[in-house]
Image (cartoon, rainbow, N blue to C red):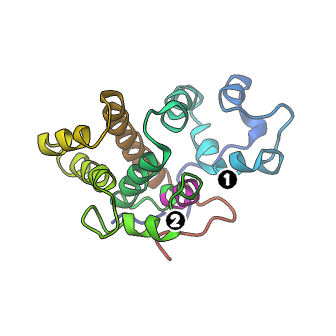
Amino acid sequence: MATLLDQPRVNPLAIKDWNEELKKSSWIPEGATEPSDLPEMMAKVFNVTATFANHPTLAKNWNHFAMHIMGSNSLEPRHREIAIIRIGFLCGSDYELSQHAWIGELAGLSHEEIRRITEGPSAPGWSDLEALVIRATDELKESNIVSDETWVALLENGLTQQQMMDLVFTVGQYNMVSWALNSLGVQLDEGLPSFLDQ
């Protein structure tokens, strides 16, 4: 499993060095120059945003897609977070896991459930649909496709066609983000404990 680099390969860019278009697309409040100037939720995910700010064109376009995944996604937030935490675990991305542990709690997952996600779809306590979301995530990571059996079972357990699409794109987005976080050496934000070390 990949380990978090203890130093960034790409340093977070200070807000004062961001261009105005990127500040706007990243919802940085006017006059903000430090993470402490940001709303609490935004400050908690500062290092990833500030690292991606080194490539403004990429960051601006990625922000739009990320906002769909975290905002207008048709999946129930609980199911979205189960998929994100599972792919983060499979990719060994401590940053992603540490971030989505608290986001998962906001989506209704208990601390025990968040830990159980690492045990996979056969761990006791999941509903049929939750186990299938984990299974689909595993299949995407292992085989690059959701199997026919899992696809049909997800539909039979209540997911719509749009939710199926959002599930695939959510796993894909956070698989890609895990690669970036691990490879760029994005460090944990202040105050967030390591998930993998717990």
- Specify whether residue 145 is in view: no
What whole-number distance in Å separates the C-alpha atoms at marks 1 and 2?
Answer: 20 Å
Query: Looking at the image, is 156 positioned above or below residue 192?
Result: above
First along the sequence among labels 1 and 2: 1
Please state the horizontal and vertical placement of residue 117, each as a whole percent of the image.
Answer: 38, 63
Find residue 167 and report its image quarter: top left
- Report which residue position mark 1 lands on: 44
Name the side, left or right, on which 26 lies relative to 104. Answer: right
- Report which residue position mark 2 lands on: 110
Viewer-nearest residue: 66 or 55: 66
Name the side, left or right, on which 188 lies relative to 154. Answer: right
Magenta segment includes 102: yes
Instruction: Report helix, strand or loop for mark 2.
Output: loop
Q: Report the number of numbered marks.
A: 2
Residue type marked 1: Lys
Q: In the current view of this chain or complex, which residue is farthest to the left?
A: 148
Please state the horizontal and vertical placement of residue 92, each as a whole percent of the image.
Answer: 39, 61
Viewer-nearest residue: 166 or 161: 161
Q: Are marks 1 and 2 in contact (CB under 8 Å)?
A: no
Viewer-nearest residue: 158 or 1: 158
Helix, strand or loop: magenta stretch: helix
The region drawn magenta spans: 97-103
Please state the horizontal and vertical placement of residue 66, each as a whole percent of the image.
Answer: 51, 35
